[in-house]
Image: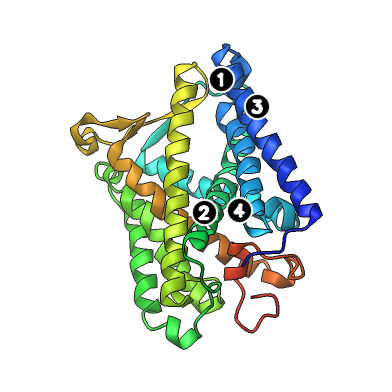
Amino acid sequence: MKGKATPSTSHRWMVHFWLGLLGMVTIQALLAAGNRFVAVWLTPMMWTAYIAFADALVLRLRGVSWLASRRREFPLLVIASVGVWLLFEAYNLHLHNWVYLKVPTDPLVRDLAYFWSFATIMPGVFETSELALALLERRSPSNPPTASTPAEGSRHTGLWFVIGLGMVTIPAVSPAWIAPFLFAPVWLGFFPLFDSLNGLLGPASLIRLGGAARRRSVWALMIGGGVCGLLWEAWNLQAALAGGGHWVYTIPRALHVFNLHYGKMPVLGLLGFPPFALELFAVYNFLRQVTGGDRIWHPSEPATAFTAWSRSPSDPGSA
């Protein structure tokens, strides 16, 4: 779905673009100058600026974007982002795959840093995926994604649900000695679990998209997740080198393939970022659906690619 450009959207995209770009440049300049505050808060600050920058590009290419067109829904996206990542943090208490270092010592300030950082995860992935989808559409224009009927999309829904449930349950109940090896099912399992639920509850499901639309949507999400993974690890390494807040991975040495790393991440772990985007899409649309869907989140607002996917073909705003 591509909206029509108007003088208002043209102005908005320029404002978002320059705020985001100048923000990223300024943050990097201050980091290079040895600014301690920027070193500690680099991750949330860079991601906030990047989200504004990416949103501007999406608005320019599609005519609609999260910050310009879905301001009523954006707080849900932020809250969902924090909640979803806290779920992964809960798993990490048992899997012990990463730890945070050099974070603020004051509990309130530390919690603010965590909240701000976690709040940028889902918006960053969705903005990048929307941008990827817009670029894919420019290379090969096609009709907007449309949902299939429930019968067409539910043939394997039960099996898909059982697979997902098993993947997210087994790591949580595994003995401590094997749990650190089981991060892959966690990074994969929530997608089939929640996408199958979405297929039953409503149209916000990749299962129910047609073949070509599904492939393009999956590619856009996985590209978005992959790009964000590279950015997360690059900026995390910068923060670590500057002595600021960062994370390190504590996965078993047997999983460090040839001891190769990208930043602090063992190269094998980079494979988790593309499916992570699929998980975020599935979980967010589930949360959106159970909190009221378009009835609550303003169907009259222009739809981004993601909110358009969550509408059924019979909805007046789905095209």
**Helix, strand or loop status at disc 2:** helix
Q: Are marks 2 and 4 in contact (CB under 8 Å)?
A: no
Check disc 4 and report the residue beneath it.
80
Separation (CA) of disc 1 from disc 4: 26 Å
Q: Are marks 1 and 4 in contact (CB under 8 Å)?
A: no
Residue 96 percent location from the top left of the image: 36, 38
Q: Nearer the viewer, mark 2 or mark 3?
A: 2
Decide if residue 145 is in sight here.
Answer: yes
Residue labelled with disc 2: 129
Q: Is residue 205 left or right of residue 289?
A: left
Which residue is the site of mark 1?
39
Residue 279, percent from left and from top: 46, 58
| Amino acid type of the residue tagged 3 in the rendering | Val
User: Is residue 125 placed above or below 195 in the rendered structure?
Assistant: above
**Amino acid type for the residue under numbered disc 1:** Ala
Of the image marks 2 and 4, the number of the one nearer the N terminus: 4
The residue carrying pointer 1 sits among few (fewer than 14), some (14 to 19) or many (20 or more) residues within 10 Å by Cα, namely: many
Circle on res. 121: none
| In-front residue for pair 312/17 | 17
Q: Amino acid at mark 2?
A: Ser
Quarter residue 263 falls in: top left
Q: Nearer the viewer, mark 1 or mark 2?
A: 2
- Nearest to the observer: residue 105 or residue 222: 222
Q: Label 3, on which residue?
A: 109
